[in-house]
Image: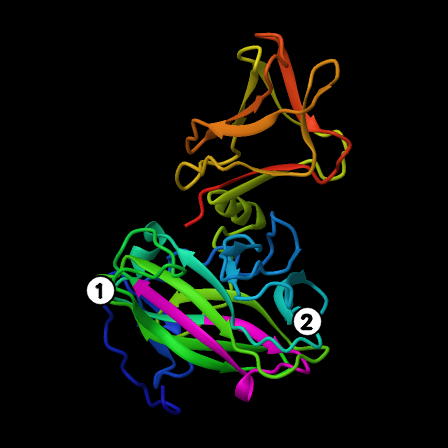
Amino acid sequence: ATGNDVPARLAVGSNGDTLVADSAATTGLRYTSGVGLTQPVINGAFDLWQRGTTLTPAGSWDKTFLADRFWMYRATAGNGTTSRQSSGAPEGFQYYFRFQRTAGTTTTNTFILAQDIETANSINYAGKTVTLSFYARAGANYSATSNNLVVELQSGTGTDQSTYSGFTGGAFVVNSNAVLTTTWQRFTFTGNVASNATELGFLIRYNPTGTAGAADLFDITGVQIDVGQTALPFRRSGGTIKGELAACQRYYWRWTTTGSSYGNLVGGFAETANNTNAVLRFPVTMRANPSTSLEIGGTLQVYDSGFVTGGTWSSNNPTTNSIVIVYSKTGGFTQYRPYVVLANNDATTYLGVSAEL
């Protein structure tokens, strides 16, 4: 109503629409479609960091992952760090992502943080008005011109591509600036997704200037995409932490021995006298067959009655559910004998597989 006993008529919506409150609407209500769609930005609250919680960007414009599902790049390494922070998170959040430019550095290369949304999770948004939202703040010495953080939501017409290489049929749904202050704010940006769009990508750019001060940084959390012109309360893509972890592990999984210097990772057997095979099974079905470039960290060894050293690691036969890891050493094994793959006095040892976009 517009006053006491003065009703205002809201015309019926389209079939399947949902009635929602909207203080910006004349009647205080509006119809919207897609309310039941899952939030497509995975790990938008930066809860999960399987690869570790701090990193120096690699430089040379290398695409580097840290927080699950988010990648970053910068032209020069060693003049900034990214990390997971908790102290001072906005209400309703435990963690946030921080990029901090190294104090005293004069390099001003652009820093980019992005997430690519695969086709299966993007096509529901084709032809719809969407609202991108997130919470962000600046450090006391944030050096971007006019305190701007460049914000983009891109669409494309390809399949499972990355904004790192560029979308086929790429177009901006949102291309704007967030003006940061040292206080947390929720920023919202609305745009229209093309009817033929099959992929989406979120991206922010920090363009530093001058010499970095002690707090030349920005923080961000609560990244979300909603259908309609209103940002809804934040929700995880997976619904719960457990669901969010499973969603992240669909793209990347790391099995660690953290806390155990001799942690057992997987068992296998000697296929020949020259190599052992072990089948590493994933906790969830991955998005696609992972790369055969197995990630190995720390000191990984094969063990029988003692450690077998001096060999080489490889992997083969990747599927969406498993991969075979191989340790080869000429004459190093007894054929058909069982062996164990474990850490050798190194609690940082891990195995990692990736099916990222």
Query: Label 1, label 2: how many angstroms apart (C-alpha)?
Result: 43 Å
| Depicted 267 relative to depicted 336: above or below | below
Residue shown at 47% from the left, 77% from the top: 150
Answer whether residue 149 is magenta in the image.
yes
Which amino acid, mark 1? Ser
Mark 2 crowdedness (10 Å alpha carbons): few <14, some 14-19, many ≥20: some
Residue 235 seen: no
Q: Main secondary structure of the magenta part?
A: strand
Q: Is residue 84 left or right of residue 169?
A: right
Mark 1 crowdedness (10 Å alpha carbons): few <14, some 14-19, many ≥20: few
Question: Would you name the residue on which mark 2 appears?
Answer: 102
Residue shown at 70% from the left, 70% from the top: 88
Q: Is residue 197 left or right of residue 152?
A: left
Which quadrant would the N terminus be assigned to in this image?
A: bottom left
Question: Would you name the residue on which mark 1 appears?
Answer: 195
Which residues, given as a range, are shown in magenta? 133-155
